[in-house]
Each structure stands twice: as C-alpha cells, then as structure tokens.
Amino acid sequence: MQTILGAGGAIGIPLAKELSSYTNKVRLVARNPKKINETDELFAGDITGKDFVNKAVAGSEVVYLTVGLAYNIKVWKHQWPVIMTNTIDACILHHAKLVFVDNVYAYSKNEVAHMTEDSRIAPETKKGKVRAQLIQMIEDAIKNRNLTAIIARSADFYGADAKTSLLQISVVDKFKKGQKAFWQSDASKIHSFTYTPDAAKAIAILGNTPEAYNQTWHLPTSSERWTGREFIKFIAGKMNVKPKYFILTKTLIGLTGIFSPVVKELYEMQYQNNQDYFFDSSKFEKQFSFTPTNYPKGIKEILHSENIAKDK
C-alpha cells in the first residue's frame, strides 16, 4: 500500500496516476477524496486528527505528504506542526517510509538566485520559518527515532492541475478574461517553475527507490532561464493576444493587502520575485537520467488542456 496524505491537489492527482505503475494499492486520503485509478482506496477525514492519521497510514509502505493548506500564516503556524507530528508519529508506528513534498521557502533569501539541495536553510519570513520547522522535525526523527524519509523539494508549480499557480492566475486567467496580465515585483528577473507532471513522476520514482531515502532532492525543473517578461510574451503568443501586463510592486501589494488578506500574504515573499529565482535540479536529473519538460512544451500542454492555445 502506498498512501497520499492530501490527495486531490496539484500534485496529489498526477502522483496517484504515476503510482499505478508501481502498485495497484493506492490509498487517497483527504476530506473528500476522489478516485484517480479504478483500484484506489478512498479514506476521508481530517489529517489534523492524530487517530485519523494513524488509521490512514496503517498498512502503508510509503506515505506521501502532499498537503496544500490555505495560504495564510495563521493557518500554517497552527496546522502544519500538528500535521507533521501526526504524520511522523504514524509512519514510525506503522514502519512506513515518508516522502514530504516541500517548497523553497526555508532557504535563505541569499540563496534564491541559484538554489541546490545544499543551499542554506535560514528563512527570514514567517512562512519560511514554519517550513524550516517542518524540515527540522523530519531530520530529528530520522536521527533519533529511526524514521526513513525523503524531502522532495519543488520550485513554484505550473501544470494543468495547478489552478492556483502564478502563471495560471497572473497570466493565463487574465488573458482569458481579456485583461492585462500581471507579474510580481520585477518581470525582468529569472523565475523557475516546476511542471507538475514531472514533479509527480519524480516523487513516485523517489518513493520507490530505497537508495533515495534520508536525502533531500530537488524535483526536476527546466534549466531554461526565462524571465517573467518571456513567460508573458510566450503565453500571449500562444493565446493570440497582445502581451500586455503590469507590475504588482511590493508597495502596491502592501496597499492592496490592507483590503485583501490573500494579497497581504504575498508581501513578505517578494524577495523571491525582485531577484533571479533559479532552481537547480541537476542532482535528480543525473541520478535518474531524467530530462525535465521544457517551458514551451509544458505551457502548450496547459493551454491545450483548456482549449485556448493557438497552434503555431
């Protein structure tokens, strides 16, 4: 049995598909899980509940923690440590391996221009400190409690199932509505994006490779160094619209955040947008002979999935 805690999201859906290549026993755990494969077992409930997580993990060989919480620091501070404690305890109790899907928030802002698995963990933001706490919990459990685990780290997502991704919300959705796109802070800076089908395939590979455990891995991400402006121009061309956009500056985010809680949450993270943000996944690529999907192909696949691409 291989179990996905937080099934149904941008990673949970494609991961369930990929795991079918390794096992016909996949358990999908969420508040309202839905089958992806015919043989999937559905397990509905709240993973902030310790007893529920124990039952959800029982019988599992590998547990994938792919939860996506509301983008709210109060929610993160309250729920993430509880979820991680429940997951680690259950995995240890039931002798299950853990694969935690992480982001880059815990890295020092000085590492963002070129991130590798060896980049320094030294966050200054509130959200980054929560993520660093989770990483420390896993590392302590590996060292002191015999947990076997992987930290699988990703850049910002994009993909057909990633409806809340930066590219989707700020560019694709805006152009669909006949509006200007927007970019945060500086469209002249490089920004890496991880394609969700690649991430899911890589997570499944890692989870089913014994030698990969007790390490951190960057999930495969294109090495193309595209700027925000280049993403906007390419997407506009494929959608047959003019590449018009505006910059959502840090000052504007601060002002808008007074009235919008969602926008307010973006303010402290602008260090990821006002400098180059490059995610290096060469460790995984070399180890598993994996070539990440390039941006033109990935973006065209997203647009075709929504029937809004111009064939050219």
Image (cartoon, helix red, strand yellow):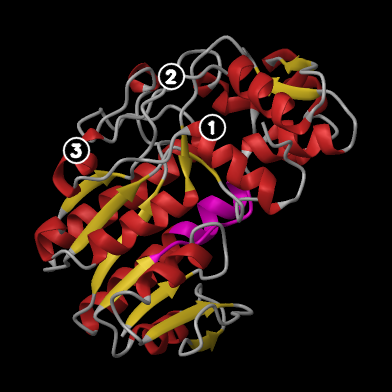
Residue marked by disc 3: 283
Tell me: residue 210, above or below residue 284: below
Q: Quadrant of residue 65?
A: bottom left
Q: x and y percent of residue 39 in the render?
A: 46, 90
Residue at 30 percent across and 82 percent down: it is 23
As helix, strand or loop, the secondary structure at mark 3 comes to: helix
Q: x and y percent of residue 257 in the render?
A: 77, 30
Badge 1 amino acid: Pro
Residue at 35 percent across and 31 percent down: it is 107
| Image: magenta residue range | 65-80
**How many C-alpha atoms fall within 10 Å of the one at disc 2: few (<14), some, or many (≥20)?**
some
| N-terminal label among 2 and 1 | 2
Which quarter of the image is occupied by the C terminus? top right
| N-terminal label among 3 and 2 | 2
CA separation in Å, label 3 and label 2: 18 Å
Q: x and y percent of residue 94 in the render?
A: 23, 85
2 and 1 marks in contact (CB < 8 Å) = no
CA separation in Å, label 3 and label 1: 23 Å
Most extreme residue toward the top is 188
- Is residue 301 toward the left or the right of residue 287 in the image? right
As helix, strand or loop, the secondary structure at mark 1 comes to: helix
Q: Nearer the viewer, residue 237 or 284?
A: 237
Q: Quadrant of residue 144?
A: bottom left
Residue marked by disc 2: 225
Task: Indicate whether residue 78 is drawn in magenta.
Answer: yes
Residue at 13 percent across and 68 percent down: it is 145
Tell me: residue 197, above or below residue 282: below
Badge 2 amino acid: Arg
Which quarter of the image is occupied by the N terminus? bottom left
Q: Is residue 164 visible?
A: no
